[in-house]
Image (tube, grey):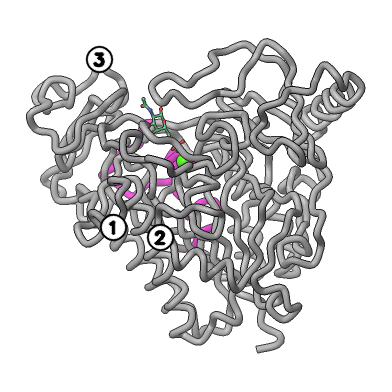
């Protein structure tokens, strides 16, 4: 086995907070599988997504480019075109070119097709066009139409006699189809804000769709469907001479939160807690699969989240009412949609055979690492060179990821909503003054926007309660220069 490159499995949660899981101090939700991964790997305390929402974070994770370099990298509707350039390097193209079998299963949310997709024909512009040899995905989010699975280029289970139509244009909504707005009596879970369009499986969504009845997903089965495909991919590639890369993107705990019945009531926190238990179980099944196939020792396993937590994200699922003392963001301020650390500092665990050999199992690292670094780091691990203009913001921090280097990056740019960026440098976070509301509409999460510059020393003030910008004008000026420099940097490595 010595000469074979390690397999790589990235498991990616959707809206999971820094404080939601046991190994990060949470006690309300049992996450034994995430905890066991951490116990045999390195758990990062300063691991970041690049953005406080999904699309931009996923964009960076795959391309190694900061999301604000691409103005399309914002929360996408379900009929948006693919936003990754086809000539762009991605973790998947780099590993594929290094001889890996590559696959993605789960949430995509990076656009599909070239605009105006015909969902009834093979689609050009899927994950298969940006490096994945196999894909089994939902196009956008579980609260957006179309509520169907796509395998490679096709909607799964579609019947020719019942084609799918999709629109996000309210003026083109299908007049005979029920909506959450007009037919609340058809809903099994009511919306609290937004989410009042087409009804699928008793849940109203964002956007309108009609037809494709045989292809519609059942939310409660989604975890098992994706897990089945992820396990199948691993089984298929386990004994091959070539290594594999699997990007397994969970749909939990994003809304609508509808666990399989066997997880209902798993926590006292209602659906949000229960779907986290469900996700943890899925992760455990994947770890067991690697063990069963005898390849756990040959596989790097990463677990992290695309952005921080949110309670009410648009459905009446009692997440806020039942949360009690549980703090989804742990000690951090803000959550999803926020420029504060709760938006982007997330659970971040890496288990690698190399690290285990180096004796770093059960290690905790405060190295500054970001998902934007996966591209360059895994390229290095696979011995694959990156082209000049590839993955321009990605740094090779593989030594930090395997627990050898305790420092990681010197600085890192992250963003809240609308590409409002900030700079983390050493233990300092600098959030330049910016217009905008203090709270995100509907969710009530703090945005971290302020008319004043903000500077926090995270080593003394992890909860970002004391703005020390005024006392540190030189540091503010230096960090402002550095942020502008990174933003202006030419797009080459
Ligand atoms: C917001 C949705 C929210 C969620 C989010 C995307 C409303 C009112 N809110 O616009 O429910 O879908 O988009 O989440 O529609 S993410 O994790 O995929 O970025
Ligand atoms: Ca998300």
Between discs 3 and 1, the one toward the N terminus: 3
Q: Is residue 415 visible?
A: yes
Magenta stretch, main secondary structure, is loop
**What residue is rendered at 70% in x and 69% in y?**
382
Residue at the spot of label 2 = 30
Q: Secondary structure at mark 3?
A: helix
Where residue 200 sits: x, y (%)? 18, 39
Q: Do the numbered discs 2 and 1 sit on residues whose CB atoms are within 8 Å?
A: yes
Left or right? Give the position of 215 relative to 57. Answer: left
Q: Residues within 10 Å of mark 3 (few under 14, many from 20)?
A: few
Q: Do the numbered discs 3 and 1 sit on residues whose CB atoms are within 8 Å?
A: no
Q: Nearer the viewer, mark 2 or mark 3?
A: 2
**First to last magenta residue range:** 109-133
Inter-mark Cα distance, 3 to 1: 42 Å
Q: Nearer the viewer, mark 3 or mark 1?
A: 1
Q: Tag count in the figure?
A: 3
- On whether residue 266 falls in the magenta region, the answer is no
**What residue is rendered at 80% in x and 48% in y?**
409
Q: Is residue 94 above or below residue 72?
A: below
Residue at the spot of label 1 = 266
Mark 1 residue CB less than 8 A from any atom of ligand 2 = no
Q: Is residue 421 above or below residue 292?
A: above
């Amino acid at each position: 086995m010595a000469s074979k490159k390690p397999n790589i499995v990235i498991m990616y949660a959707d809206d999971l907070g820094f404080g939601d899981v046991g190994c990060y101090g949470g006690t309300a939700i049992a996450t034994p599988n995430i905890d066991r991964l951490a116990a045999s790997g390195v758990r990062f305390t300063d691991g970041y997504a690049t953005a406080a929402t999904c699309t931009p974070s996923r964009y960076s994770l795959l391309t190694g480019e900061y999301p604000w370099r691409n103005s399309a990298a914002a929360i996408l509707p379900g009929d948006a075109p693919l936003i990754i350039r086809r000539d762009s390097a991605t973790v998947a193209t780099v590993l594929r070119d290094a001889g890996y079998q590559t696959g993605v299963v789960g949430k995509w949310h990076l656009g599909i097709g070239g605009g105006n997709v015909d969902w009834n024909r093979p689609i050009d512009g899927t994950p298969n066009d940006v490096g994945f040899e196999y894909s089994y995905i939902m196009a956008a989010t579980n609260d957006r139409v179309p509520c169907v699975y796509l395998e490679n280029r096709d909607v799964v289970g579609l019947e020719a006699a019942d084609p799918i139509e999709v629109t996000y244009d309210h003026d083109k909504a299908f007049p005979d189809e029920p909506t959450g707005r007009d037919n609340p009596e058809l809903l099994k879970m009511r919306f609290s804000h937004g989410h009042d369009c087409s009804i699928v499986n008793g849940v109203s969504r964002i956007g309108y769709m009609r037809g494709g009845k045989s292809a519609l997903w059942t939310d409660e089965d989604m975890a098992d469907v994706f897990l089945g495909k992820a396990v199948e991919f691993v089984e298929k590639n386990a004994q091959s001479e070539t290594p594999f890369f699997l990007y397994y993107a969970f749909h939990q705990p994003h809304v609508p939160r509808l666990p399989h019945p066997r997880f209902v009531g798993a926590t006292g926190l209602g659906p949000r807690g229960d779907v986290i238990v469900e996700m943890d179980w899925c992760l455990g099944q994947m770890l067991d699969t690697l063990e069963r196939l005898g390849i756990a020792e040959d596989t790097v396993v990463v677990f992290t989240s695309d952005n921080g937590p949110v309670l009410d994200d648009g459905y009446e699922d009692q997440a806020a009412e039942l949360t009690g003392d549980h703090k989804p963001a742990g000690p951090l301020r803000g959550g999803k949609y926020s420029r504060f650390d709760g938006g982007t500092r997330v659970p971040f665990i890496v288990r690698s055979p190399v690290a285990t050999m180096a004796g770093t199992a059960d290690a905790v690292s405060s190295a500054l690492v970001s998902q934007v670094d996966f591209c360059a780091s895994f390229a290095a691990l696979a011995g694959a060179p990156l082209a000049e203009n590839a993955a321009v913001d990605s740094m090779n921090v593989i030594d930090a990821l395997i627990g050898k280097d305790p420092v990681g990056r010197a600085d890192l740019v992250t963003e809240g909503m609308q590409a409002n960026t900030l700079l983390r440098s050493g233990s300092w976070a600098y959030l330049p003054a910016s217009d905008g509301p203090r709270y995100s509409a509907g969710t009530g999460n703090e945005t971290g926007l302020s008319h004043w510059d903000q500077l926090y020393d995270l080593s003394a003030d992890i909860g970002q309660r004391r703005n020390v910008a005024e006392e540190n004008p030189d540091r503010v000026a230096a960090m402002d220069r550095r942020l502008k420099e990174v933003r202006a940097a030419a797009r080459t490595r």
